[in-house]
Image: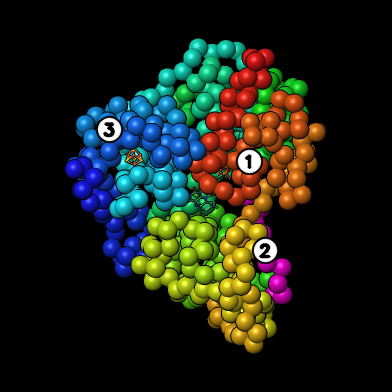
Amino acid sequence: MANKIPRVPVREQDPAVRATNFEEVSYGYNAEEAMLEASRCIQCKKPRCVEQCPVSIQIPQFINAVNNGDFLAAAKVIAQDSLLPSVCGRVCPQETQCEGSCILGVKGEPVSIGKLERFVGDWGHENQIDLSEKAPANGMKVAVIGSGPAGLAAAADLAKLGYGVTIFEALHRAGGVLEYGIPEFRLPKNAIVAKEVENVKKLGVKIETDVVVGRTVTIDELMDEEGYQAVFVGSGAGLPRFMNIPGENLNAVVSANEFLTRANLMKAFDSTYDTPLYVGQRVAVVGGGNVAMDAVRTAKRLGAEASIVYRRAEKELPARLEEVHHAKEEGIRFEMLTNPVEVIGDADGWVTALRCVRMELGEPDASGRRRPVEVPGSEFDIPCDVAIMALGTSPNPLISTTTEGLETNRWGGLIADESGVTTRPGVFAGGDAVTGAATVILAMGAGRTAAKAIDAYLQGK
Ligand SMILES: Cc1cc2nc3c(=O)[nH]c(=O)nc-3n(C[C@H](O)[C@H](O)[C@H](O)COP(=O)(O)OP(=O)(O)OC[C@H]3O[C@@H](n4cnc5c(N)ncnc54)[C@H](O)[C@@H]3O)c2cc1C
Ligand code: SF4
């Protein structure tokens, strides 16, 4: 039986070698491996994997095409719902979505849906497949703010419907977190992100970089003076949070966002660039999500002894399982059930240690996870030269404070209904700007939903 075939393992760079370079960790499947893995799918009549995909990719159909060796057909199936297959195949938390509900996972190992998606996406780029089918221009203009996954997905769907779409992006490169946050060793920029952005442009979407909406131009100006009939705000959640503990303003206490932006967008890891990035000998990263894993693994690659400091237990780490596994293989130290209470510095104002307390798990809290409780008298120091705070982010208030009638909730998220309709007529929003920091695929799903709502609004449906 097809499902007796064991899951095809993926080839990866040796951990000791990759911990010293920024090349991609995983090599992905080749055609033979992809076809063998695809043959494991039993083509469920009611595919649970699709129900769990936020953009509803027709998973069994594309896997069937891979199984038949028809990679073009597979690419066409995926392109109906996603223009970022190489990105999603690399960074989606498949274990809690499609793969987490794959029927084969009940008694064995689920189909490697993410690796198959990555294979198809990469095959499309290598073979320069053009999947840009679109309707004739309908003469209406929509502005999209932010070129992250939410903005790109909304722009692609609107362009396919015939709208003239322009994305306004504050940074000098398009892609949002895919470009400035997630490191090269997980998601190559020129080889993958730029190519998937290019596919969105092939649909006719224009991207204007270095435009900070709220400063360079406002939403009101875009709508009242520049002829945009609707606006989608996909500006993300790029404002880092801190712990508010003593010593947090010492030199070399940085947010993970700043650290990763310097490394990725400003190419500090590349010695031919001038961007400074101080790592010292020892780096402590506070947090347990994907952002924390990316920061700690980047610090390790830049030559530091690097540790994760997380206040809950290992099974509660919110990061993707694969990232935690890779981090461990690369020699990252994990200080679990540990909470910083103070940052200690020297006479010149530089960090020397994180003062921490040990935690134990108490009763479940509102999130259902057991609440970490301080162990009395357990204070100890973790020596470090750099402390990186990876504690989550909030939306930047620039857009809401410069747009008439656009309301936010108490933590700064834009108020929008499930279709992305905001409190300002004609303005829609989705992704991290609405939900707070979440995932690439949820942001894409929100962008697609809002595109439908924008179309309905503009067509008077
Ligand atoms: C380091 C890191 C690692 C992550 N790892 C994963 C992972 O492995 N898997 C996963 O699924 N998710 C991961 N995430 C989360 C995921 O990347 C985000 O949920 C997703 O990118 C949100 O998409 P978005 O389009 O809403 O916002 P973003 O990707 O943040 O894009 C928003 C864009 O809007 C631009 N912008 C903001 N304000 C303005 C303005 N005023 N004018 C013009 N442009 C503006 C920003 O510059 C940015 O380019 C990670 C996040 C980080 C930070
Ligand atoms: S649930 Fe698993 S086996 Fe069933 S169609 Fe989806 S990938 Fe294939």
The amino acid type, in three-letter code, at marker 2 is Phe
Q: Main secondary structure of the magenta part?
A: loop
- Residue 220 picture quarter: top right
Residue 440, how many percent across, how many down? Answer: 51, 44
Ligand 2 is within 8 Å of the C-beta of the residue at disc 3: no
Disc 2 designates what residue?
A: 242
Give the magenta range.
235-247
Distance CA(mark 3)–CA(mark 1): 36 Å
Relative to 400, 34 lies left or right = left
Q: Earlier in the sequence, mark 2 or mark 3?
A: 3
Disc 3 designates what residue?
A: 64
Q: Please identify the quadrant where the N terminus is shown.
A: top left
Disc 1 designates what residue?
A: 235
Packing grade of label 2 (10 A; few <14, some 14-19, many >=20) is some
Of residues 322 and 234, which is closer to you in this image? 322
Q: Is residue 111 magenta?
A: no
Residue drawn at 34 percent across, 56 percent down = 25
Residue drawn at 32 percent across, 65 percent down = 15
Residue 311, how many percent across, how many down? Answer: 58, 71
The amino acid type, in three-letter code, at marker 1 is Ser
The picture quadrant for ligand 2 comes to top left
